[in-house]
Image (cartoon, helix red, strand yellow):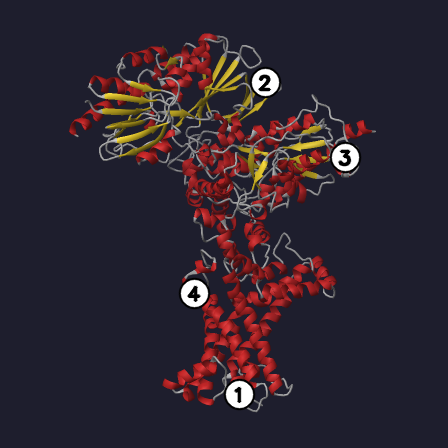
Amino acid sequence: MSKTVLIIGGGVAGLEASGVLSKLGYTITIVEASDRIGGKLNRWANLFPTQRPAEEVLNYLKFQLDPNTSIITNTKIDDISLGKTQVSATLSNGNCIQADAVLVSTGFEFFDARKKEEYGYKIYENVITSVDLEQIFKDGKELKTSQGKTPKRIGIIHCVGSRDEKVGNTYCSKVCCVTGVKQAIEIKERIPSCEVFNFYMDLRMFDRHFEDIYKKAQVEHHVQFIRGRLSEAFENPDGSVMIKVEDTLLGKPMKMNLDLVVLMVGFVPSSSSVFLKKGLQLETGNDGFFTPADEHYKTVCSNQKGVFFAGACTGPKTIENTITEARAAALEIATYLNQN
Amino acid sequence: MLFDWFVLPFTLGLAYLLVVVSVKFYCWIKALPYSEKQKLKKAIFTTKSLISFKEIVMESLLHRKIFKVNPLLGYMHMSLAFGWLLLILLGNLESRVFNHGEMGPPYVPIFFRFFNPNPTAFAFHHQFSFIMDLVLVFVLSGVALAYYKRLNSNTLGLKRITKHIPADMLALTALWFIFPLRLLAESFTSGSLGGGSFLTANLGNVLNSFLPSEILYYPFWWAYSVSLGLFFVALPYSRYMHIPTEMLLIFLKNAGIEEQNSHSGFTEVELNACSRCGICIDTCQLSKAAGINNVQSVYQLRDIRYDTQDLNRSLNCLMCGRCDTTCPVGIDIAGIRQIKRNESAPGLAENYTYIKPQPVQHADVIYFAGCMTHLTPSIKKAMVNIFKNSDINFWFMDEQGSLCCGRPQLLAGKNQEAKILMQKNKMAIEQSQAKALVTNCPICYKMFHEEYKLDIPVYHHSQYFAGLLDNNLLELNHLNTSAVYHDPCELGRGSKVYKEPRQVLNSIVALNQPNDDGEKALCCGGSLGNVSISSEQRTLVTKQACDTLLQNQPEILVTGCPLCKKTFQKVSDTPVLDLAELVNNSLISRKQKPKPLKKLEKIDQVLNSLVPNQTADLE
Amino acid sequence: MPDFGYKIAKDRQIDYDENKRLIFSEVAAWEPSIYRCISCGTCAATCSAGQYTDYSLRKLILLVKRGEEQEVITNVSKCLLCGKCQLACPMGVNTRNLILGIQNAVKKTTYAV
């Protein structure tokens, strides 16, 4: 009988690792808390930097899954503990699972923008998040203000819930910069007459093609970038939102009325990580993300034998990095299971 | 006349003490502001003096408040203070009875047993000896506890004890020796010459069995006298000055005298009345949560008393007022810290010439949100909605962002700056001809309420809602949820508003009670009062306060201050709401469901004037 | 350098070599959180005083760091001390104490001159 691997979380990392491990001959069980696999990809229309449809990546991930993989959705883990060579988990559906190795691929959650109260999310009608905007794109709906008008001016606010000790998240979420640029372009593609402003502290265009779309946004779509972090937003009687920033490059305070404000929400650790940390006795950093055995050369290993990581559970990550890491994790798991 | 050379240290020490204390008392009373002196004159021959006398017995002798903190600690203080007094009083009585009413020099009753080692002719000899020994045991038990407190303060309810200065250590050492030396002196005397009772006689016999009592008793009387004299000489310069000063303080306080804006004779009395018991160290959240152990009130008061300037220490305080409520002497600690800040006036004088007169609008009620509320827009929105729903003709004075009320400047010791802002705001308030001012910010509330001297009433929104509820201008749904209420420092201890927020909340939610509630409520850590601590230290304070509030797992954490709300939001997974939001959420729209107004009989006149539209309807 | 009898108007450049940065060393000792500032401008955006006058804490911090002390002196006394910036700062700069620290340093260094 082949050895078994329990994968916690059926998002990008979990699915990719599952595909590879199946090919290597292991028996896989994926436990997914939500009603479907694919994770956050299900909520995204197009991916940066190339704007390819998210569905393409999702289809690839599903296609390479082994048909014998046991996928348990709508299920949480109630109890998990490490034995000498095995991990045992009790699921919320009452079943018990024994596995020879476990992959933690619990990913991340979006920062709850209501915590940044001064930005007015869920208080002002025309303040939405990058996730809401992506949903509008995905549903193919027209972008309108809550009053049903086509917005003439939209502000994209970077670093919401990232690099902000006032909400307890001091880290950079890495992908919101480029997402903000991507979404600015997508707005302009839909409503060319709409003015789009990106308000940023630093723009971190670190990866291949990122700089290209930053340039494209300015040259082709005339998106404007203002270096200043939003301090607070006010709601006008007509529902538009007045924001306050400092145009730091000019050194002057600035107010601007916007028809729609889009908050680039950052990553926070999955709510399950506290529970898993306790059950599997894992280590997390001050930011709440899991700490791998070594930050350079053992990024997919945990401090526990037989427990492995892949994806955003160890910190904000792009999809391509997540997929790469999932494969690395699969290989690491295979090596581990062969040795035992 | 009864005399021996060894009585000199005691007698000279006592004389010195009496002179110094009298001079100090005289100077302090002389340094009271004129108005306060008048208060004292008026109060001195009234029942207030009787009340003071009773308080002196309860607090200075029996230490009632310390008993409340910890019974063992209370007993320690009581046995030393009350026991010593008994020793003096009974000693006097014994001496008088023995000498047939003759007073003699003051040292006679103190050293009674030296001069009358075995007064067999004295009728009540055995009774007196027994009582005196008993009282000595009582005092010695206190001394033993005091020794023990140095080793293990936890048993006496103190996690941390005060670190003392040399004068204190000298006086403390002398004090610690006094009673054991008396015990030994009396025992040796008894051992060699007889007399004494169950304690001194027995101990004397034991000691005499292996020590030469007849040689030793005399040096021990010397030692006893020296330790007394030393204690008396050190007393005015040490924390033990609190013993006489506390009594004076009680008199002054009962006469209605209080701290002013600057250092006065009363401040000196308060400073000297601090016994440095250290109860404020444990009360302080900076100590409990953030491990900051050198800024507490006991040290601040000592700094000022000995004039060792440390600006940072006076700025490193949340000004939450918790120590004021636990201080057994009842010193106005926050007031003194404020005076210190005023005097040191950190930084430079600000230049506010750029501030132009504020735009004004006529209205019945002014709503002032305050600076912090602009970072909590949900509160603003709720307030505006509630005003509209109750048909109040209101002016949102700082809708476009406003001038600060001035309290942050005041807290930083910048009085002049605060005055300028007050003047600008006051002008706008007066010009609006409003009949009341409502604010949802306790910081602003305290400022408008206490410092502005406005002709119109100032309400915290909790008070205003309570008024609207009483007058049926506000109708609320009871939400099926549980909540805990956090008293903001500036509202609770700062302005004594405890009742109204709870009254409003009780009509909306099921309130549950946290451990530290009301007067004991913890500070959220966001306080503007503290200028020095780092963001991380604040968070430690916040986390501890939050854990305390959420110990019974309420569904909502409610507060009445935008700063508290914002501070708790950082660490709390439980939703944090302001009272205004909760009221707004449970609001029954009066537009949809007009409710016939009851006949308004007992309406507070002021609240009546807040709602002219409605009173007009009634007529 | 020969004296031509006239002076050239002061160079606009920040002369980093020439500037003393006395205020900075004082302030950094008083309130080390000055090192945390990333110049995002949230403080200046939310500033109550900044609505009415040319005042930006972000700029003031940079002027202190560069040693442009004359400009620091002209700008340092406009703060309302309301603390809004402290509540808004994403980096946890202790802004109120920082401003008091700059003022104290100005007081100290200008007296020293």
Give above or below for B212 relative to A93. Answer: below
Estimate the x, y position of residue A79 in percent, counting from the top left: 34, 32
Classify residue B468 by image quadrant: top right
> Mark 4 or mark 1, which is nearer the start of the sequence?
1
Query: Left or right: B594 with respect to A225?
Result: right
Disc 3 to disc 2, C-alpha distance: 34 Å
Classify residue B151 by image quadrant: bottom left
The disc placed on residue A239 is 2
Estimate the x, y position of residue B343 in percent, counting from the top left: 57, 52
Q: Residues within 10 Å of mark 3 (few under 14, many from 20)?
A: some
Disc 1 to disc 2, C-alpha distance: 95 Å
Q: Chain of mark 1?
A: B
Same-chain status of marks 2 and 4: no
Q: Residues within 10 Å of mark 2 (few under 14, many from 20)?
A: some
- Label 1: which secondary element: helix
Residue type pointed to by label 4:
Tyr
Disc 3 to disc 4, C-alpha distance: 62 Å
- Viewer-closest of A256 and B575: B575
Residue B169 visible somewhere in the drawing: no
For disc 1, the marked residue is B115
- Label 3: which secondary element: helix
- Label 4: which secondary element: helix
Give above or below for A39 relative to B358. Answer: above
The disc placed on residue B608 is 3
The disc placed on residue B527 is none
